[in-house]
Structure formats: structure tokens, C-alpha cells
Image: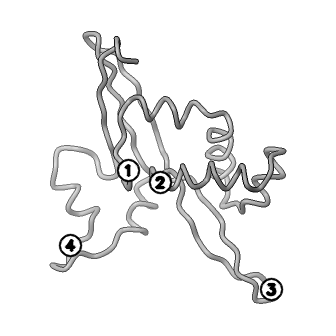
Amino acid sequence: MSKEWDPETVFEVLGSEEVRRILAAANVDPVSVQALADRLDASEPTVYRRVNVCQEYDLLREETRVDADGNHYKVYETALERVCFELDGGVFEVDIQLRRELVDESTAVREGGESDAEAESEGDDEPGAGGATQDADEA
């Protein structure tokens, strides 16, 4: 992920109704900011701000498309698959999992020929997953 998740950030980012609606809309089909603004009945600058936050945390994948007239435009697709919150022993644990096929498509090949996804799969965590913990008193 571009930015590290902690439980406070997870609650802050996903606590935004606009962010949740953007993620839900972009989960169905890739969608442009203009289409999102229409669906959310929000201004394009507001949608761009929320989209930027989502991209900072790798929740949205951006793709450039070309229309019939040769004009370029961007569409966004949700990369988030699941967020799981668990309260165990007075500590919040958060597990964030990204859609594997989107993670695989966007990873760059490292110098040794190993992709980021392959390197992550050698660890204990699921590929594309992030986890964070926070004491319940801090939440």
C-alpha cells in the first residue's frame, strides 16, 4: 500500500459516507469522476478529493481509457475486497484485503524478476492484505 494503515486511519477513511459510496459504485464497473459525481450528487472537486484519498491507500485502481473521438479519460475500479475488524483482549485488529487480480495487474516487476505480489506471498500475510492493531482505549 502507498500509505500505512492503522485502525484510526481505517475508521477515518472508511467512515466517510462519500468514500464508501465511491468504493461501492466503482466495485460494480470502472467509473469516471464525472459519473461518480452524478451518482453521488456531489461536486467533481469533492469526488476528486475522496478518490485521491482512496488512491493514497490503494483502495482504487486508476485506468486511462480513450473514447471514440480519441479523448483520454480516467476510470476507477475498487481494489478493496474486504475489511475485517476484530476486538480481542481490548485491542482492535484490522485486516484489509485487496482484490488479488487488481494487485497482480498493478505490481511492477522487481530487478530480480520477482513481482511485488510474489514477494508478499513469501511472507505470512495474504498477498494484498494489510493489518493494523489499536488498543480499544485509543479508538
Left/right placement of residue 76 relative to residue 85 reads right
Residue 17 in the image: x percent, y percent? 67, 33
Circle 1 residues within 10 Å: few <14, some 14–19, many ≥20: few
Q: Earlier in the sequence, mark 1 or mark 3?
A: 1
Q: Front-most of 44 and 32?
A: 44
Q: Front-most of 122 and 63?
A: 63
Residue type, numbered disc 4: Glu
Q: CA distance from mark 1 to mark 3?
A: 36 Å
Q: Which residue is mark 4?
A: 114
Residue 104 in the image: x percent, y percent? 38, 65
Q: CA distance from mark 3 to mark 2?
A: 31 Å
Left/right placement of residue 65 relative to residue 129 reads right
What is the secondary structure assignment of the residue under circle 3?
A: loop
Instruction: Single out the mark in the foreground, 1 or 3.
Output: 1
Could you tell me which quadrant the C terminus lies in? Answer: top left
Q: Front-most of 118 and 139?
A: 139
**Residue 106 picture quarter:** bottom left
Residue at image position (20%, 72%) is: 114
Residue 41 in the image: x percent, y percent? 84, 45
Residue 6 in the image: x percent, y percent? 35, 34
Whether the residues at callouts 2 and 1 have beta carbons within 8 Å, the answer is yes
What is the secondary structure assignment of the residue under circle 4?
A: loop
Q: CA distance from mark 4 to mark 1?
A: 22 Å
Q: Which residue is mark 1?
A: 3
Whether the residues at callouts 1 and 3 have beta carbons within 8 Å, the answer is no
Residue type, numbered disc 1: Lys
Per the rendering, the mark at residue 56 is 2
Q: Which residue is mark 3?
A: 68
73 lies above or below 35:
below
